[in-house]
């Protein structure tokens, strides 16, 4: 059963002092990152599982099995799941916010869940932080359509030493269309749009001190009408650094929905990084 954010069941959780703080809002992005980075691996795994199932109530037995918390099956399921949450109280105090999850104690067991809006906040801030730690690389990220612009806004807001540029993969389905779209997005010289090799040459001639993020949305459509070799050539050319001389870098961020990546026909040499995979 999916619970909308305004479902009264969220406020009927079993509670406890950790649920008395302020609700998470879009104004709490910095606090969400502080909270996340203060957690241990068990707590992060627990929250990742709930974030991927946002809006749902998850029974403690599913958490036990899904997270492989008791591989030998010798411990109390409720106690093992609760033990995964020991490190969540200190971040609560540090941020002045309530737990990002809810729990309901019922006769059939204990259920846990996370509001969709709360999961969205944590997803975009942790992804943005992850991107910033991987300068010069290519990252393929899963993100729902309605979270693309908030993610880009977060990346821009927290970046003061680099440009953030965006291109539409849906406008880059062929080589000639990609050259035109990317020449404009990267503000390359006019003649870079005249052909594929001219475009690659223009990329090679950029200043070594240049620092930027290139976000390609609808990324699974990038060069979809070309062969795989051209796709690989483009991706290799679009990210680089950090450079020893000049210190510049270009990080390529390929964004698309989970469903789009699942059905994507290409096998890539990209370091694919999924949400919350720290």
Image (tube, rainbow, N blue to C red):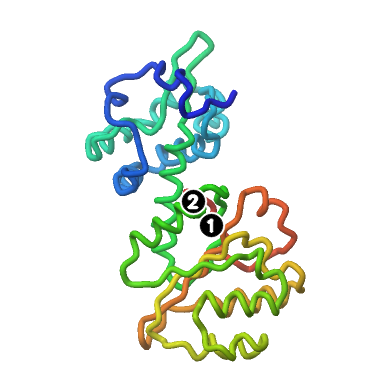
Q: Residue 203 placed where, x, y %?
A: 53, 85
The image shows residue 54 at horizontal and vertical percentages of 52, 34
Q: On the picture, is 12 further left or further right than 184? A: left
- Image coords of residue 57 (percent x, y): 52, 24
- The label number, if any, that marks residue 277 in the structure image: 2
Residue drawn at x 23%, y 34% is 93
Q: Looking at the rendered structure, which numbered label has been put on residue 31?
A: none
Q: Nearer the viewer, residue 11 or 103?
A: 11
Percent x, y for residue 56? 54, 28
Q: Which mark is residue 273?
A: 1
Q: Quadrant of residue 14?
A: top left
Which residue is at 71% across, 69% downward?
Answer: 173
Query: Disc 2, disc 1: CB below 8 Å?
Result: yes
Observer-nearest of 268 and 211: 211
Quarter of the figure that contains the N terminus: top right
- From the viewer's perspective, is 116 left or right of 129? right
């Amino acid at each position: 059963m999916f619970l909308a954010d305004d479902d009264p069941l969220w406020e009927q959780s079993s509670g406890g002092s950790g649920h008395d703080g302020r609700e998470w809002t879009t104004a709490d992005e910095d606090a969400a990152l502080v909270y996340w980075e203060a957690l241990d691996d068990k707590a992060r795994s627990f929250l990742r599982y709930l974030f991927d199932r946002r809006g749902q109530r998850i029974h403690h037995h599913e958490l036990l099995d899904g997270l492989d918390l008791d591989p030998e099956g010798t411990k109390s399921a409720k106690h093992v799941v609760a033990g995964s949450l020991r490190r969540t109280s200190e971040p609560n105090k540090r941020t002045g916010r309530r737990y990002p999850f809810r729990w309901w104690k019922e006769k059939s067991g204990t259920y846990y869940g996370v509001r969709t809006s709360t999961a969205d906040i944590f997803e975009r801030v942790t992804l943005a932080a992850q991107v910033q730690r991987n300068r010069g690389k290519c990252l393929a990220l899963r993100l729902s359509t309605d979270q693309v612009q908030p993610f880009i806004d977060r990346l821009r807001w927290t970046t003061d030493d680099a440009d953030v540029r965006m291109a539409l993969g849906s406008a880059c389905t062929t080589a000639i269309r990609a050259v035109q779209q990317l020449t404009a997005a990267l503000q390359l010289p006019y003649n870079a749009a005249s052909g594929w090799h001219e475009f690659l040459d223009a990329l090679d001639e950029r200043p070594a001190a240049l620092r930027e993020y290139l976000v390609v949305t609808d990324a699974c459509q990038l060069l979809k009408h070309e062969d795989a070799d051209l796709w690989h050539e483009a991706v290799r050319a679009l990210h680089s650094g950090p450079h020893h001389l000049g210190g510049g870098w270009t990080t390529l961020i390929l964004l698309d929905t989970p469903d789009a990546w699942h059905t994507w026909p290409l096998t890539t040499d990209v370091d694919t990084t999924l949400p919350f995979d720290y």
